[in-house]
Each structure stands twice: as structure tokens, then as C-alpha cells.
Image (cartoon, helix red, strand yellow):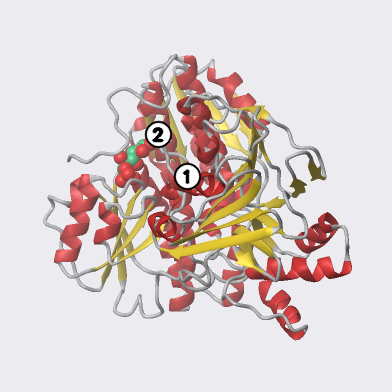
Amino acid sequence: MCGIVGYIGEREIKNRLVDGLRELEYRGYDSAGIAVMQNGRIDSFKAVGKLSNLEEKTKEYSTEGLGVGIGHTRWATHGKPTELNAHPHMGEYSYVVHNGIIENYREIKEKLESEGVTFLSQTDTEVIVHLFEAEAEKEEDLFKAFKATIEQLDGAYAVLLVTQKAPDTIFFARKGSPMILGRNRKGEIFFASSDAPLIGEADEVAYMEDGTVGYVTPKSLYTEPQELLFVPLAGDKMTAQKGGYRFFMEKEIYEQYDVMSDTMIGRVLDNDIYFEEIDEKFLEGVSRIKLCACGTSYHAALTSSYLFERISKIPVNVEIASEFRYKDPLLTDDTLFIVISQSGETADTLEALKMAKDAGLKTLAICNVDNSSIVRLADTTLLTRAGIEKGVASTKAFATQVMVLWMLSLFFAKQRKSMDESAIKEEIRFMHYVPKVLQKSLEVHEKCKRLSKRYLHGHGFFFIGRDIFFPLALEGALKLKEISYLHAEGYPAGEMKHGPIALADAELFTIALMPKTLLYDKTKSNVEELSARDSTILSISPDLFDLADDFILTHPHNHPMLEFFEMMVVEQLLAMEIAIRLGNDVDMPRNLAKSVTVE
Ligand code: F6R
């Protein structure tokens, strides 16, 4: 995914920008570029491929003294990864870098073209710089011109703009795509789309809120609608990378809002789902899907099995990779084989993928790490774009896997005409709310923190749910057991009376996922059965449930997937708070590794 950096200061500017971009490399990119402004002149360089290509191009170039620079690594969404499409994009006298997507760029482009503006690239970003220059023709105050530009953009953006008309100034705006401003005691100013480039450089940073627009010079900083709130950035890499959170897991839970927007960018359009990685003929000859994964990724697979059957009307079966490998599976070439993996290195999943390939099946990977072994092997990959996940307990990777799979089920529904267009549009309408649902909810976190003290003992936890909330129950139980070391199981709510209910007593904790939009009454009767056996019940639901001992109230939503994502965050926070109270190392639980490269 794209990365942004910016710099104002007296050190050599090109190196600052390229070093910053290198810290963002892990996000993946296919071209890079910088623009440097000094003494009213702007020099810009771009290169396709790795940063080393950009370095090669700029090896004769360096700066001395005060100056301003912006830089970008681009992950192609609109238009191919070419030099012309790489950022920064230029107008007559200004340059812009942008992360995100401008949904109404076509209308803006047509209007500007009709006024005589010539466009060089196929990107949505280029409209920003031309629009700014058109506004600057009408308005002398360049911040007002910049603001007027931003107000005309629909979509998600983090934008930095420099213009020869305002030397030493960087204009910036953020909506739906992260942007951080850092500064240090030497008076240097830094921008970055995530904190990695700022560590060791900035003393304090401000994480911009959505809707922020402003400008900065070596002497002044102005923002609307409110001032930026600066917080210290620790000097040591580990603490700094945690960005003020106690654990990487906590940071990653809170990051889900931003990374989900990244996952959706360029793919979830107003009325359509678009995957440039998959062509129209992809499903030709496919009449069933087999999903294969381990652990949390297996739970994402299981969740999607409901979606593929319900939405795309394709028969699905889901396999745990370590089981699949040795069962002499019958593989038929009408099967699309989908593997899901955060790391892309899980030995069992990788081997399962090899078996499917050897059997001549079409293969698709859903993965978070570009260039990983699984990505290299699969015919096609959809990257989840969650960014690096450090906590051993997977959180944002799971969220983005489920999202990609939901998107894919709709994409297939359209290709197979298994759902009418208006119903697909309605699903997409709800999909747009997901990042909001994942936005930090301090009240819910507080509630999880408070409740956690009551759940440190007992002889076990049952997480129960129905339909897609069953895999979510499995995931809640896995999260809890791996970091708290307490015994927890996930069960389909309707299965309890077929055996597990024998364990029910006051020391058995039932975490009941009770969404209002899906089988509420059915789940409720299952919980009532447990309550009648004196099990201690914690209900997670938008409705109060009078038989519950404790409750966490979620927001009412009109779609099961929105309830799913909100309950997922509750499970993550609850597991984390219980583990913290028990004094465990949340990020590095005992006996576990982040990447399981042995079988
Ligand atoms: C649990 C967890 C593991 C992984 C599993 C598969 O929080 O992270 O269960 O999901 O080891 O790993 P990947 O997704 O990298 O294939």
C-alpha cells in the first residue's frame, strides 16, 4: 500500500525522504518518487520498482540548507505502475503526493480538461494538484485555495502538497487515510503515513484526526478545525513503535479502523467490488471452492464459507491445513483452492497449496505479506493490506481477511449472477460502514477492562454463537486461550445441549454472542438453557438480556457483518484485558511463534 513522507529542515533532504520511504517499504509498493523544493525551485524524481531504482536516479542529486520535501511509495490502484503514474504529481508550479482514493476524480478531471488542463497520468491523484492551481488562480490566500480544493474531494485521502508560490510550506489534509506530523527540538518537521519513519527523528508526534487540513512552515503550524494534539514519541524503537499503547496487540486492535480503509481502497467502490488481481474469466470452470488455512486464518475461512454459499451460491468446504495434507484428499479440477495466511509462510498451508497446485487446481491466496512463499506460489493473490502485525495473537490480520473474503463473495456473486444487482449494492452500502464500526470505542474498552477482573478463575470459558458468529466464537476462544492460558472453547450455540452443557455450573463462563440481526431468538434459547444450569453468562449484544450476569452492549446495526466486526473487537479487548490482569506478556505468549514454519 502507498506510503507518504514529508520533511522540512536543514539536513540533506533527499536522504531524509528516501530513508523515510524505506521504513514504509514493508507495506509493499511498485513505484516511488520525491519532490524537493529549495529557493523557489522544485526538483522531482520518480522510478518504477524498488527504492534502489530511485536512489540510482538521484545519486548525483543532493541539497544543502533549508528546504522542503515530499515523498511517496505507490501501490497502483488507478493506472499501471509506470513512472508517469508515480507520485509526486505535478501541475504548473506545484506537486502533490496522496494516499487513498478520490472517488469523484472523473468528474473533476472532465471539468478541468474542459477548461484546458492537460493530464499526464491515469491516476485519481493528479486532479488534486490541477484543482489546487485552478483554485489558486481565483484565491490569493493559498491555504484558502488548498482548503477549497480539499472540500471538493470525495473519498479517502492523506495529502501533502508543495508549491513554488509558498516556499518552505507543506500543505496537508487527512480523511480516512492516516497521516502523522512529527517535530523535534532542532526545529525539523516530518510527515509520515505511519509512525515507522518518525522513530528516532521526531520527539513528538500528532496523529491527525479525520477532517484535518492545514499547513506548516519552519516557523508556523496552522490546522483546522482544531489544533493538533502532540504526544511524545519514545526514542527507543520498540516503545516508539507501540505508539503509546501498552502492547502491540492493543495498538493493532486500535489500528483496525485505518487498515480496514486500506484493505477497501480501490476495491470497494460506490456500487461495485473491483479486484484488479482477478480477471473476468477467473471463475470459468469453477463449480466449488475449497478453503484451507490454520488457526485464526482458518476461522476467517470458516466465516467466509457462510458468505460464499449464501451470497455467491457456490458449494464450499473448509479444511484445516494440517489435516488436509494427510487425508489423501480427492481434488477435482472444478475446484478453486483458496489458502488464507497472515504470514504467507505457514508450513502446513504452504504444503496444502503445493498439493492443490500439483493436482492442477486453480489457486488463490489471501495473504498479508507480499512476496511470501504462499504469495509466490499461488496463481493469484489478494493482499489483505493490514500492515505488519507484531502481536502473536492475530487481530487486524483476521479483520482484513474476513473483509477480503466478504468482498470476494460479492465479487463472485456478480460474476455468477447469484444475487441481483440491487442486493449487491445494498451489501456494499453496509460494507462502507465497517471502518467506522472498528473505530476506537473507549467505553467498550473500559467495560472490558472492568469486567476482566471477574473472569480470572473458573474452570473454563465457552464462547458460543450461531452462523458466522460460530467462527467468531472460535476466534474469541482462541484469542483468550493463547494469551491468558485459560481454557476456552468455541461452540455453535445449538450444539451445547449435545454434550458440552454437562460442564455448566457457576464456574463455567459462557460468552454469548447475541447479534440482533441473525438468529437472535435461537441463540437466546440456547443461552437460557445454560443459564438454567447456573452457568455464568456474559452476553455481548445490542440488547440487554435479563438472564445474563454481565453484559457488554454493542451498537445496534442493520447488517450481521457490522455486528460481527464490532463483536470481534470486543472479544479482542476482553482477551487482552484478562491476559494483562493475569500478568502475561500479551505480545509474546508462552509456547507460541508468530510464523509457524514447521509442521
Ligand atoms: C492466532 C494466530 C495463529 C495463526 C496461525 C496461522 O492468533 O495468529 O492461529 O492464525 O498460526 O498463521 P498464518 O495466518 O500466518 O498462516
**Quadrant in the picture for residue 126:** bottom right
Where 179 sits versus 147, above or below? above
Query: Which mark is in front, 2 or 1?
Result: 1
**Residue placed under numbered mark 2 in the picture:** 393
Q: Secondary structure at mark 2?
A: loop
| Labelled pair 2, 1 in contact (Cβ < 8 Å) | no
Mark 1 CB near ligand 1 (8 Å cut):
no
Q: Identify the mark nearer the N-term, 2 or 1.
A: 1
Name the spot of residue 152 as percent of width and height, x first.
Answer: 77, 65
Tell me, yes or no, if residue 469 can be seen here. Answer: no
**Residue placed under numbered mark 1 in the picture:** 19
Q: Residues within 10 Å of mark 2 (few under 14, many from 20)?
A: many
Where 308 sits versus 174, above or below? below
Mark 2 CB near ligand 1 (8 Å cut):
yes
Name the spot of residue 547 as percent of width and height, x first.
Answer: 60, 28
Residue type at mark 2? Ala
Name the spot of residue 488 as percent of width and height, x first.
Answer: 38, 28
Tell me, yes or no, if residue 293 can be seen here. Answer: yes
Q: Real-space Cα distance between discs 2 and 1?
A: 30 Å
Name the spot of residue 371 as percent of width and height, x first.
Answer: 31, 55
- Position of residue 523 in the picture relative to residue 543 (left or right): left
